[in-house]
Amino acid sequence: MNDETQSDIDPRFDPAFQRGFDPATPVREHEPAPLPRVAVRTVPVTTPDPVVPAAHEPPPATLDAEDTADVSLDSYPGRNPYLLILGVVAVILVAVGVWLFVQSGAQFNSREVRSQGDYMSLDATIHMAPFISLLGAATAIGVVFVFAVKWRRRK
């Protein structure tokens, strides 16, 4: 009844991917039995009756043109102080990165490098300056992205 060569093989999984599998042994494909079909019963859906306000209640407030203009101006990204700050930070980061790169390159060409510490700080600065500029450029791209997402064509 029990085949000794297949004793370590778990019948739930493909034998080819289990320990002790012999490729020369034919593999019996096991397909699970199809699941029985279940009849689906439809249930009628009823919608609730609309709520009618009482005669003494005022009608619900509607937005007029001024209210919609105020709502759209509040969500305008030009009024967001954080985006303004990020724009300024982006410009500063690009400027500082370029300035550091130029200054550290000029220091390498001078005779001011006297110790290994000076050399290491110049080396770290010249390698980090492009990343500072790239961070500023990425910040500027992010700010432009926010403006692009919120942009609507004027009517």
Image: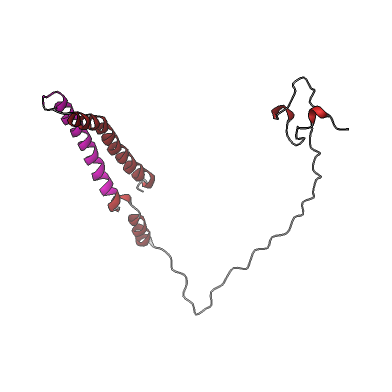
Quadrant for residue 18, please give it.
Answer: top right
Please determine whether, in this image, residue 59 is positioned above or below residue 148.
below
Closer to the camera in the image, 62 or 71: 71
Lateral position of residue 147 relative to residue 42, left or right = left
The x and y percentages for residue 96 are: 20, 37
Please determine whether, in this image, residue 38 is positioned above or below residue 121.
below
Lateral position of residue 112 relative to residue 53, left or right = left
Magenta span contains residue 140: no
Task: Name the residue at the left extreme.
Answer: 111
The x and y percentages for residue 58 are: 46, 75
Lateral position of residue 4 relative to residue 134, left or right = right
Q: Which residue is drawn at 68% across and 63% down?
A: 46
Quarter of the figure that contains the N terminus: top right
Please determine whether, in this image, residue 131 is positioned above or below residue 56.
above
The x and y percentages for residue 30 are: 79, 32
The x and y percentages for residue 111 are: 11, 24
Marker count (numbered):
0
Please determine whether, in this image, residue 80 is positioned above or below residue 120.
below
Q: Which residue is drawn at 85% across and 32% down?
A: 2
Numbered range of the magenta stretch: 83-111
Task: Name the residue at the top extreme.
Answer: 24
Q: Residue at x 74, y 29 (%)?
A: 15
Residue 87 can be seen, yes or no: yes
Task: Name the residue at the bottom extreme.
Answer: 56
Lateral position of residue 105 relative to residue 46, left or right = left
Residue 28 can be seen, yes or no: no
Magenta span contains residue 104: yes
Question: What sort of colour scheme is used for the picture?
Answer: secondary structure
Closer to the camera in the image, 74 or 128: 128
Closer to the camera in the image, 84 or 67: 84
Q: Which residue is drawn at 26% across and 44% down?
A: 87
Q: Give the main secondary structure, helix, strand or loop, of the magenta stretch.
A: helix
